[in-house]
Image (spheres, helix red, strand yellow):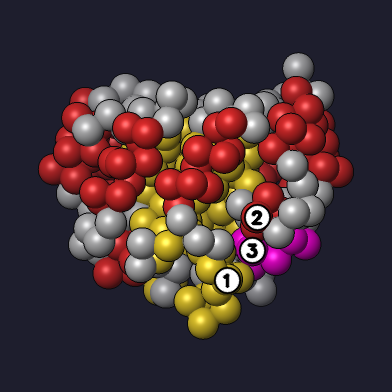
């Protein structure tokens, strides 16, 4: 299971939000310095998100995303406000390894599937979800501010067998809380797609990563391909070295 340390950008600073709420954010300083520190400690991937672009739908800090990408010797996956084919092309041409489509994929799955076919394995499907009272996982869009009315299963069915590089599944209610990942929801995602699944939201300890590394979907036998970790690192609850060791337990 691959580790994806997260660098979330807001007004050109590295921040962490709680459940996507900009009023519950903590500032962690220079995002480039944070990214370089993650890599020095052994990270083999980075997950960089432009939170301002995710909310507005227009690029805010794309130059900073590209600067981070060019400063580190590891592949970078990015998302946030990527709504058009031109955005995907621009980011991939600038050196990004993978671009995550969230709102764009939920609102137009067919167009997202076409982009995945144009750039095999370099486009990821971002499914940021909340659990409804009936237990269904509903995808949220536009910086997590608007419910889509579509379930995770609906979106996965709509994109079919398009060659996405990953599905990044984020449990919004767990994100930034350090309360543990949504293993039940992730199991459902694993069962619903053959695309590699990257878990996001809630990791607060080494034990959480060990649990994700050990997660096996009962019907398909599939395992997670990766996990995004953010606040646990910057709050000092978990080191990158410990996290890499935990992720390796899935081998």
| Residue 142 locus on image (x, y percent) | 35, 67
Residue 246 screen position, x and y as percent: 79, 32
Instruction: State the SS at label 2.
Output: helix
Which quarter of the picture shows residue 134? Answer: bottom right
Q: Position of residue 37 (x, y in %)?
A: 57, 40
> In this orientation, does residue 150 appear?
no
Residue at horizontal 24%, vertical 38%? 91
- What crowding class fits label 3: few (fewer than 14 Cα within 10 Å), some (14-19), or many (20 or more)? many
Report whether 70 appears left or right of 197. Answer: left
Q: Nearer the viewer, mark 1 or mark 3?
A: 1
Q: Which mark is residue 26?
A: 1
Q: Is residue 19 above or below residue 181?
A: below
Report helix, strand or loop for mark 3: loop
Left or right of residue 137: residue 71: left
The residue under label 3 is: 176
In this view, 192 is above or below 23: above
Q: Which residues are magenta?
A: 173-179
């Amino acid at each position: 299971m691959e580790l994806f340390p997260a660098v979330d950008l807001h007004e050109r600073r590295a921040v962490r939000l709680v459940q996507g709420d900009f009023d519950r954010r903590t500032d962690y300083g220079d995002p480039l310095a944070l990214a370089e520190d993650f890599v020095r400690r052994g990270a083999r991937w980075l997950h960089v998100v432009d939170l301002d672009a995710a909310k507005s739908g227009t690029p805010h800090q794309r130059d900073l995303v590209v600067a981070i990408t060019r400063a580190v010797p590891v592949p970078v996956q990015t998302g946030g406000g990527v709504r058009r084919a031109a955005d995907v092309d621009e980011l991939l041409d600038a050196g990004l390894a993978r671009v995550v489509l969230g709102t764009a994929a939920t609102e137009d799955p067919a167009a997202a599937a076409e982009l995945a076919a144009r750039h095999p394995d370099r486009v990821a499907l971002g499914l940021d979800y909340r659990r409804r009272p009936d237990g269904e996982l509903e995808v949220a869009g536009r910086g997590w501010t608007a419910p889509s009315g579509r379930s995770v299963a609906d979106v996965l069915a709509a994109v079919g067998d398009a060659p996405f590089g990953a599905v990044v599944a984020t449990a919004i209610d767990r994100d930034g809380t350090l309360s543990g990942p949504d293993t039940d929801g992730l199991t459902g995602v694993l069962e619903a797609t053959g695309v590699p699944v990257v878990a996001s939201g809630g990791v607060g300890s080494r034990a959480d990563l060990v649990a994700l590394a050990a997660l096996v979907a009962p019907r398909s036998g599939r395992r997670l391909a990766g996990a995004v970790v953010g606040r646990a690192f910057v709050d000092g609850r978990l080191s990158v070295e410990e996290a890499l060791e935990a992720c390796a337990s899935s081998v």
